[in-house]
Image (tube, rainbow, N blue to C red):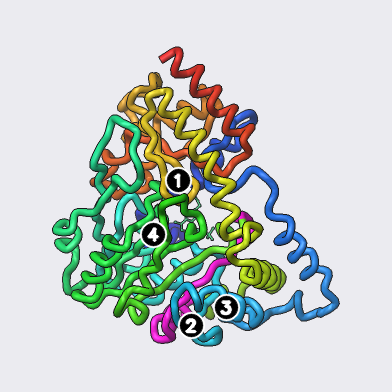
Amino acid sequence: SEKHTYANRLRGTEKNVWVEFTKLASEPGVLNLGQGFPDFKAPEHVVCSLQKAISSDNQFIHQYTRPFGHPRLVKALSKVYSPLLKREIDPMTEVLVSVGAYGSLFCTIQGMVNPGDEVIIIEPFFDCYEPMVRTAGGTPVFVPLRPSKTGVISSSGDWKLDAAELESKFSQKTKLLILNTPNNPLGKVFTLPELEMVANLCKKYDVVCVSDEVYEWMTYPGHQHVKIATLPGMWERTVTIGSAGKTFSVTGWKLGWSVAPEHLLVGPKLVHQNCVYTCPTPIQEAVAEGLELEESRRGSPECYFTSLSLELLPKRDQLAKVLEGLGMHPVVPEGGYFMMADISQMKADCPGDGSNEPKDFRFVKWMIKEKKLAGIPPSAFYCAEHKNMGENYIRFCFIKEDSTLEKAGEILKKWAAES
Ligand SMILES: Cc1ncc(COP(=O)(O)O)c(CNOCC(=O)O)c1O
């Protein structure tokens, strides 16, 4: 009966690009350059840490642990982030561990947004930001990064915010601004001047910055990740979010965290204690050990915080070369492990405009079915009014085996030859 339908606050959040495209990409024989996870083994030492945690003779490893974060983990997070945030992070009051960065985002948005509050979202954005804001009763306000050049190979750094346009989105109702650097799907690493522009507006309009930094360790030569919380006057108004899944390439572990001043974690902790209460103890123990090891060897070539981006660099450059060779003008990322490519040259007789789906959705569905190659349609990372900004692109993930990327290149080359 009507009484048994789903809650009204969920209206409009029915479509989810991951639910739709992971299903399509899981069809037999499809080469998956879609969702962001590696198709190679996780780092050996991290897997060993979990095996050790599971077989530990400390029987409490299999029981509830501290609600806001397993003591060993929050201490390890404080050791890793104190130097990066240039201040002593209190593990007991300034860290909240959650179910992935998704969980951190959910607890932060649900914990801080009142009905009618506005939340500025910079496009293209990681799609969950919009439904999380809307289900909290908030009003998302979108501002796009605009490419300074198209139709040629470019860099994610060529996509910029217009200062006046950005400021025009702020109002007395603005509660949060969600920043994602390195950005998904572009791979843009926000520069210090760009972060100063964002920081100055957050201070001017008294706005809290939610800084999604899950790709913080993945920047390429010449590009430094800057934590906006380290800018003057920003620590007290920033929630910095990280992900064990992305840090250690174990996206199935679903563990994330928020690092922020105590007063900004009050709401998120209230949400957390009543929806998840605490995260898996064995996973937290393993991530703690992983962080301790990386911290102990930071700066050395074995440190995973640096070795992963060195492993990804040739993959990025090789994929960019193949795409450019086919006239798919890649947007070469400065960070992260996704690459946007221009699909306007590619011939695809995908179903006509009958369906009200954006062109890239139809294109990618056709490509998966006819070419057995999966990507993600970037219009999913834009608001309804701005879908056209994403529909001439496709997002490819390149944290994949070289053989996977080579096979993808073969499929694309063959296709381009027919186009
Ligand atoms: C910017 C951003 N924030 C948060 C998250 C979520 O992180 P976690 O997996 O730790 O919940 C992700 C994970 N994205 O993976 C899907 C994809 O883009 O292919 C992310 O990209």
Mark 2 or 4 closer to N-term?
2
Out of 135 and 246, give the one closest to the viewer: 246
| Residue type beneath disc 2 | Glu
Say which label, 3 or 1, has the lower sequence index.
Answer: 1
Reading the image, the residue beneath label 1 is: 17
Name the front one of labels 3 and 1.
3
**Span shown in magenta:** 249-271
Callout 4, which amino acid? Asn
Q: Earlier in the sequence, mark 2 or mark 3?
A: 3
Q: Residues within 10 Å of mark 2 (few under 14, many from 20)?
A: many
Residue 359 % position (x, y): 34, 32
Residue pictured at 38% horizontal, 45% vertical:
380
Q: Residue at x 46, y 26 (%)?
A: 366
Tell me where residue 244 sits by quadrant.
Answer: bottom right
Mark 3: secondary structure: helix
Q: Secondary structure at mark 4?
A: strand
**Between marks 2 and 3 in the image, the one whose residue lies nearer the viewer:** 3
**1 or 4: mark nearer the eye:** 4
Give the residue number, with chain letter if any, for mark 3: 79
Q: Tag 4: Cα neighbours inside 10 Å, few (<14), some, or many (≥20)?
A: many
Residue 151 visible in the picture: yes
